[in-house]
Image (cartoon, coloured by chain):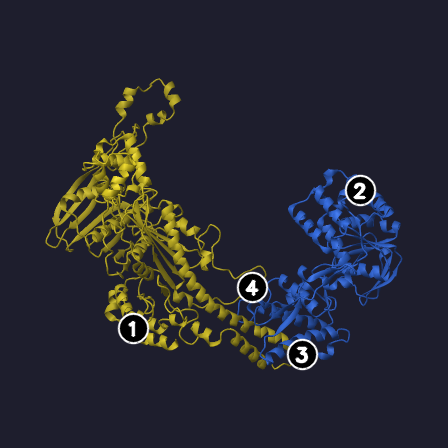
Chain colours: A blue, B yellow
């Protein structure tokens, strides 16, 4: 077994085995075994304005075994650690859902399952990521492939040459693990990267060959971009010096997607430094655009209560304190309306490609 | 009741049994005035006047029998049994005799082949008691005249109130089968037994005597009523069986024998050997009368002056207070009562309502009593915890009343000891299938069980509005609390405000509601104490259980992480040791009866009374009889062929709390008290008591 561990994964594998050592050591000293797990919540993150990142604080929570409230979680943590170690040894990658199935069984002599739903196992994997300071990719856990990329960029994936300029309008499906060991950026001649929130609008731009005309890379994460997409954007930004523009709906969720790309998310604050793109720009849809681009009022959607609450939360986040942003969000609240990117089709099917984005780029009309 | 109406509905004078007359056409047309005017044969006032006539009460109730609880055959059967048993119990208690009542239900073939009880449509109900009997002259009127009785005019607590019940039952029998009521009554061993067959003349509301003779009767004293009625026998909710069972809960001083139509004999033994204190008769309280009633009393009184009228015809009005009321109402105390009229009477009435008058005396009410309720609940309902609460008397509309609540919780030790189902691995989205059994509410008014119209009853509403969650019982919004629980509510009063004549639900007066709520809260609080304490012991156990379960998993995971060469046994032992030391160690074992005293949890029932809980300091003290002792007790009962629902359920040794502690005196007192409860047979054998000394000393040692 020990030999099966490859050099590459040795560090993470050792950390996982170290968890068993904690239990054994505590048992020998008749102590309650416990792990320290950094807290993943708003209370334990702070915005570093100098670096432009959301950073995780120092607050930790102890997870101990002999505590009725935590015993089950502790047991689950051990099971997940065991499953992850198994992956390390076999050098396989797996999904969150497979981990859940792998670790689920009924505890002997009882009615109780180790896990009842995947909602119980997912946070434990995140707990392990933060407490072991190991990335999900390093733990060999992948997320769903749910991003697409198209444009003048060439990747090497498992030895295959992937030229994203020659993949038609469908583009290349971004894998969930895009670390250099898995995905190599061989060539990139683009001038900038456009990250689009919605797959539908990405399709529009791809179909219209917007990327060819403006020499850019088009990337989408279908909603909140998954790690792979964010990490790839970051790599293109960092390694190929591509400026990143984010195109989202004009609603609080769109703003938040932009902020996650730019500063990192609260839940994954510990990964901000690898994922965030502090120089990313918000290109649209801005709450000023309906007026500027003469969108009729009737293509707007009334903000619901949730939207309003969320917008007010955003107003309080440290990373939305720039006057331009305060103005942007307040303008949306005042108008009481939100706009989808799709609403631009009201003017013309190709309005986004032919008018909106060209004008935006020409006027350098974006928010930082 | 004898209301005069202008409706000529009961115009036809059909012979007695066939009263289902069709409505004359003229009535139907009269309902539409416009068509009446148009019709050629317009009716003149004179013609109408010719049709207007008195309606007898009996005729009225023939048409409106649902008002008395005869709406459907099943309910009718119950109502007949109920009326007969109520009368028997009232009579026995008033005469100071411990009631011994036999109820017999038989199917009547009625010319066809005998049907199975569940299919039969005709029944003979025979109710026999050992009461004082009825004097010969009164028999026909008691059983065949509506609104004739001793109870209506008195302010005294009794089961019956109006004097309708038994005659209405007889009339129902007469209507549906044509058979008369058969009555045997004997007032004493030296008196002769009289046999009567009576029917009601529904037009005149007078009895018709068909048969009247002296017979030989085996019983020295008592009354037997036999009715033949159309009915339907069905077990379950709101059945005769349920009613009798509930009656026996609230009347543990009654010995009840019930012969079911299926040929079974159910015996509800007497477990409480004392008659409830006889209720006293009282005068009306000034707060309880309406203006009309006051006017009538002013006319009818024998007193010479208003002041003496107030002081003598009402309770709680002293001569001084009477003077004060008169002064306040600006009526001269010396005025003749008959001269107080109109405005003056109204002022007097209002003054009375605003004057502070002492609450009516409450010795007119005879509550069941906490001990008797406990004994009744214990006898009939399996549970692990019983409690009973008697509220102090209160007053609504000038009528004194007492609310009593009882509570039985749990499935009983036998049920709890049953092995759990085999484990099936649960898939996502499945759950353990938690039990959603709801509590059962049993309601009583003057010791009579109420089975119908539960949701209209003040008691039921009070149960719903009590926040049972505060007492550790789950309850969804607007529903009964969930759990194996029986909630007992009794209202005793000189006048129970029913929502209808069929006496099915108690009306929702604020004062009554409040008292019920207070009683339920007290019972709930005690249940809460019991549950919390049991929970505490169980949660320690569960904690350790959790750890025991998880230790296996954690050790297995560690072993795999370490490449499979871990001394797993050693690690397990180390972890178990930590678990045990962190969850109360041996103490929990003891509290849960793991040291050999019984099955998990508390093996037998606990009774909490107002003084608190027995064995306050120590949970282990409550583990009373061992299973072996219980078995011994069960065996000691003579094996009878009949099915006895209460077999082997005498009170366990240590369940009754007496006084402050476990002193020697209190133990003796306890034994004495139990003598009241325990079945005669058990008492004779003294089996449970043999265990006692050993038990007490064992408890001491543990302490």
Q: Helix, strand or loop at disc 4?
A: loop
Q: Chain of mark 1?
A: B
Q: Are marks 3 and 2 on the same chain?
A: no
In three-dimensional space, the C-alpha distance between marks 2 and 1, rounded to whole angstroms, equals: 97 Å
For discs 1 and 4, the disc positioned in front in the rendered view: 1
In three-dimensional space, the C-alpha distance between marks 3 and 1, rounded to whole angstroms, equals: 65 Å
- For marks 3 and 1, the one nearer the N-term is 3
For discs 2 and 1, the disc positioned in front in the rendered view: 1
Q: Chain of mark 2?
A: A
Quarter of the image with the C terminus of chain B in it: bottom left
Residue A349 numbered tag: 2
Residues at discs 2 and 1 in contact (Cβ within 8 Å):
no
In three-dimensional space, the C-alpha distance between marks 3 and 4, rounded to whole angstroms, equals: 30 Å
- Foreground pick, B302 / B191: B302
- For marks 3 and 4, the one nearer the N-term is 4
Residues at discs 3 and 2 in contact (Cβ within 8 Å):
no
Q: Helix, strand or loop at disc 3?
A: loop
- For marks 1 and 4, the one nearer the N-term is 4
Percent from the top left, x then y, of residue B301? 20, 37
Residue hosting label 3: B563
User: Callout 1: 10 Å neighbours few (<14), some, many (20+)?
Assistant: few
For discs 3 and 1, the disc positioned in front in the rendered view: 1
Q: In the picture provided, is B163 more to the left or to the right than B220? A: right
The residue shown at (36%, 44%) is B507
Residue B664 numbered tag: 1
In three-dimensional space, the C-alpha distance between marks 3 and 2, rounded to whole angstroms, equals: 61 Å
Percent from the top left, x then y, of residue A55? 73, 62
Percent from the top left, x then y, of residue A175? 77, 61
Q: Helix, strand or loop at disc 1?
A: helix
Q: In the picture provided, is B38 more to the left or to the right than A141? A: left
- Foreground pick, B234 / B612: B612
Residue B426 numbered tag: 4
């Amino acid at each position: 077994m020990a030999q099966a561990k490859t050099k590459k994964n040795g560090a993470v594998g050792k950390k996982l085995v170290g968890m068993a050592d904690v239990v054994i050591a505590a048992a020998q000293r008749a102590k309650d075994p416990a792990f320290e797990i950094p807290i993943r919540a708003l209370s334990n993150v702070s915005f570093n304005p100098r670096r432009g990142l959301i950073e995780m604080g120092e607050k930790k929570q102890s997870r101990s075994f002999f505590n009725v409230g935590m015993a089950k979680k502790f047991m689950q943590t051990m099971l997940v650690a065991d499953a992850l170690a198994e992956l390390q040894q076999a050098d396989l990658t797996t999904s969150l859902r497979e981990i859940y199935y792998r670790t689920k069984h009924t505890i002997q002599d009882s009615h109780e399952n180790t896990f009842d739903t995947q909602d119980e196992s997912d946070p434990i994997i995140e707990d392990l990521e933060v407490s072991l300071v190991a990335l999900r990719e390093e733990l060999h856990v992948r997320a769903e492939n749910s991003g697409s990329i198209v444009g003048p960029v060439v990747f090497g994936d498992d030895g295959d040459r992937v030229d994203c300029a020659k993949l038609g309008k469908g583009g290349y499906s971004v894998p969930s693990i895009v670390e250099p060991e898995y995905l190599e950026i061989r060539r990139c001649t683009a001038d900038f990267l456009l990250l689009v929130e919605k797959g539908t609008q990405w399709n529009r731009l791809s179909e219209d060959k917007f990327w060819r005309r403006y020499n850019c890379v088009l990337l989408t994460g279908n909603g909140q971009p998954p790690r792979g997409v964010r990490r790839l954007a970051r790599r293109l930004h960092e390694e190929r010096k591509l400026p990143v523009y984010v195109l989202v709906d004009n609603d609080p969720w769109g703003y938040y997607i932009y902020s996650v790309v730019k500063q990192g998310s609260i839940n994954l604050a510990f990964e901000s430094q690898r994922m965030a793109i502090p120089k990313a720009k918000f290109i649209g849809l801005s709450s000023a655009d309906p007026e500027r681009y003469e969108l009729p009022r009737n293509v707007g959607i009334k903000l619901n209560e949730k939207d309003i609450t969320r917008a007010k939360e955003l107003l309080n986040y440290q990373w939305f304190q720039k006057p331009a942003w305060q103005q942007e969000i307040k303008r949306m609240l005042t108008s009481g309306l939100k706009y989808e990117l799709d609403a631009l089709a009201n003017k013309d099917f190709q309005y986004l490609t032919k008018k909106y984005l060209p004008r935006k780029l020409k006027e350098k009309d974006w928010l930082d | 009741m004898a209301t005069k109406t202008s409706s000529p509905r009961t115009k036809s004078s059909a012979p007695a049994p066939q009263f289902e007359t069709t409505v004359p056409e003229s009535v139907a047309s009269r309902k539409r005035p416009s068509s009446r005017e148009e019709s050629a044969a317009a009716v003149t006032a004179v013609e109408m006047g010719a049709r207007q006539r008195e309606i007898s009460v009996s005729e009225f109730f023939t048409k409106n029998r649902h008002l008395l609880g005869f709406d459907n055959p099943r309910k009718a059967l119950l109502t007949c049994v109920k009326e007969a048993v109520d009368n028997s119990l009232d009579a026995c208690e008033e005469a100071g005799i411990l009631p011994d009542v036999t109820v017999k239900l038989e199917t009547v073939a009625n010319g066809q082949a005998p049907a199975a009880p569940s299919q039969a449509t005709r029944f003979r109900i025979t109710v026999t008691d050992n009461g004082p009997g009825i004097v010969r002259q009164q028999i026909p009127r008691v059983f065949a005249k509506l609104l004739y009785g001793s109870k209506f005019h008195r302010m005294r607590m009794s089961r019956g109130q109006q004097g309708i019940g038994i005659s209405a039952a007889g009339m129902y029998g007469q209507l549906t089968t044509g058979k008369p009521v058969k009555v045997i009554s004997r007032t004493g061993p030296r008196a002769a037994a009289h046999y009567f067959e009576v029917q009601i003349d529904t037009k005149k509301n007078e009895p018709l005597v068909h048969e009247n003779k002296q017979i030989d009767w085996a019983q020295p004293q008592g009354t037997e009523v036999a009715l033949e009625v159309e009915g339907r026998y069905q077990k379950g909710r709101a059945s005769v069986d349920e009613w009798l069972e509930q009656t026996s809960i609230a009347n543990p001083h009654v010995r009840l024998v019930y012969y079911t139509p299926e040929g079974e004999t159910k015996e509800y033994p007497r477990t409480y050997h004392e008659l409830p204190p006889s209720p006293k008769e009282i005068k009306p309280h000034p707060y309880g009368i309406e203006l009309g009633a006051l006017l009538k009393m002013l006319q009818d009184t024998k007193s010479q002056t208003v002041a003496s009228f107030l002081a003598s015809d009402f309770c709680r009005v002293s001569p001084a207070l009477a003077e004060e009321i008169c002064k306040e109402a600006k009526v001269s105390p010396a005025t003749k009562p008959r001269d107080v009229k109109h405005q003056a009477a109204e002022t007097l009435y209002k003054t009375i309502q605003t004057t502070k008058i002492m609450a009516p005396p409450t010795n007119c009410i005879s509550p069941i009593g906490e001990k008797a309720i406990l004994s009744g609940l214990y006898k009939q309902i399996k549970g692990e915890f019983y409690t009973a609460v008697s509220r102090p008397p209160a007053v609504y509309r000038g009528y004194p009343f007492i609310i009593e609540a009882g509570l039985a919780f749990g499935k009983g030790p036998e049920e709890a000891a049953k092995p759990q189902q085999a484990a099936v691995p649960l898939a996502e989205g499945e759950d353990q299938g938690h039990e959603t059994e709801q509590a059962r509410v049993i309601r009583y008014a003057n010791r009579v069980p109420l089975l119908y119209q539960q949701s209209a009853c003040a008691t039921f509403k009070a149960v719903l509005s009590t926040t049972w969650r505060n007492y550790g019982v789950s309850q969804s919004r607007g529903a009964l609390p969930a759990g194996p629980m029986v909630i007992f509510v009794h209202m005793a009063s000189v006048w129970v405000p029913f929502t209808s004549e069929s006496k099915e639900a108690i009306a929702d007066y604020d004062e009554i509601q409040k008292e019920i709520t207070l009683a339920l809260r007290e019972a709930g609080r005690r249940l809460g104490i019991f549950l919390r304490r049991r929970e505490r012991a169980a949660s320690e156990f569960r904690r350790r259980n959790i750890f025991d379960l998880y230790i296996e998993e954690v050790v297995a995971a560690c072993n795999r992480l370490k490449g499979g060469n871990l001394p797993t046994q050693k690690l397990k032992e180390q972890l178990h040791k930590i678990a045990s030391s962190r969850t109360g160690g041996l103490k929990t074992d003891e509290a849960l009866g793991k040291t050999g005293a019984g099955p998990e949890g508390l093996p037998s029932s606990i009774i909490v009374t107002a003084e608190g809980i027995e064995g306050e300091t120590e949970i282990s003290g409550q583990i009373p009889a061992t299973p072996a002792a219980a078995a011994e007790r069960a065996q000691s009962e003579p094996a009878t062929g009949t099915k006895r629902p209460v077999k082997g359920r005498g009170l366990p040794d240590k369940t009754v709390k007496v006084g402050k502690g476990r002193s020697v005196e209190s133990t003796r007192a306890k034994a004495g008290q139990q003598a009241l409860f325990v079945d005669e047979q058990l008492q004779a054998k003294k089996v449970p008591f043999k265990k006692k000394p050993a038990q007490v000393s064992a408890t001491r040692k543990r302490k």
